[in-house]
Image (cartoon, rainbow, N blue to C red):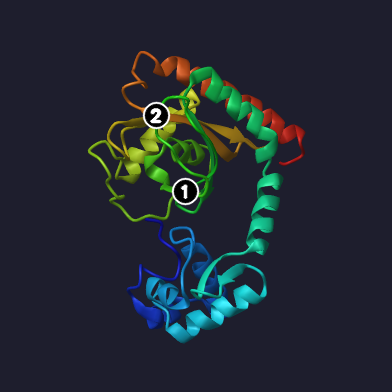
Amino acid sequence: MTEVPGGNGGTGGEAAGAASARPGTQAVDRAIAVLRSFESAPQQTPTQIAHRLGLTVSTAHRIVRALHAAGMLGRDPRTDRYFLGPATAILGRLALERMGTTLMQPELTALRDETGEAVSLGVRVGDEVAVLVQIPSVHPLRYDQEPGARNPIHVCAMGKALLAYDDARVSMAEPYRRFTPATITTRAGLDAELGRIRRRGYATNDEERIVGVRALAAPIRGPAGQAVAAVTLQGPAVRFTDERLPDLAKAVTATAERLTGLYAGAGLT
């Protein structure tokens, strides 16, 4: 489940959030939290939002009405349920265009066609990776990550590829959350892994988040060499065998290099 800033799934309460908020930012933080709550609940009433975020019902109503008036939320008058509105769709589309996802789509599709495996494009958002684009595998047995999905940065191949070429460290406290016996849970372990990624040019996820799922990812680089996004191949371990991994790694790194060139050539740096 995706966590949202300003709340803990309905625990913690509004008073705790108010005490920790920076002066002048509380209203903004709460509005962002309300919008992000729709990532995991596509339609909600103000009361449901209040419970989810630890707000009072009156505060949730006030924020929701303001976002609705701005077109950021839509409303079903029959149920009083709100959903992401046209203004968020427009902003999202503009953001994706600015990030070059339309330009990159043919290369991502070509990588899927070459390998037969699912391809994703993601970016760093704090200590998470947000999936922007996914091209499904051609196989019935596959692992899908829908656009908008978020994954903890330390347990996915895209996340480690992004971290390896980013000066910003994770803010998570140790030990990091463990998902499987293979999860890296310490800063020292993660640093060692990032060094290996820089030496070979790609990252792996060897059943570190979901048992039976493996992935490889490579960074899309900006002008200073920083990772601006990452591209990944992911699928069941029964197809991502040790014997096949070198060919998959070659394919994903070659695609990342071409996407880096497209990104720079389009003036998106």
Disc 2 element: strand
Residue shown at 34%/45% (left/top)?
Answer: 187
Q: Quadrant of residue 73?
A: bottom right
Residue located beneath label 1 in the image: 149
Residue shown at 45%/41% (left/top)?
Answer: 145
How far apart are the two marked residues, 2 and 1, measured between alpha carbons?
16 Å
- Give the residue type that dot 2 points to: Gly
Query: Where residue 80 sits in the image (x, y, percent)?
Result: 50, 76
Decide if residue 7 is on the left or right side of residue 161: left
Disc 1 element: loop
Q: Residue furthest front?
A: 78
Query: Where residue 233 sits in the image (x, y, percent)?
Result: 47, 29
Residue located beneath label 2 in the image: 235
Q: Nearer the viewer, residue 89 or 269?
A: 89
Image quarter in which the C terminus is found: top right
Graded by Cα atoms within 10 Å as few (under 14), some (14 to 19) or many (20 or more), the crowding at tag 2 reads many
Q: Residue furthest left?
A: 181
Graded by Cα atoms within 10 Å as few (under 14), some (14 to 19) or many (20 or more), the crowding at tag 1 reads some
Image quarter in which the N terminus is found: bottom left
Q: Nearer the viewer, residue 187 or 64?
A: 64
- Work out whether residue 223 can be spotted: no
Q: Quadrant of residue 190?
A: top left
Residue shown at 63%/67% (left/top)?
Answer: 72
Q: Residue furthest bottom?
A: 58
The answer to which of marks 2 and 1 sits earlier in the sequence is: 1
- Work out whether residue 191 can be spotted: yes
> Quick check: 111 above or below 25?
above
Query: Where residue 131 sits in the image (x, y, percent)?
Result: 51, 44
Residue shown at 64%/57% (left/top)?
Answer: 89
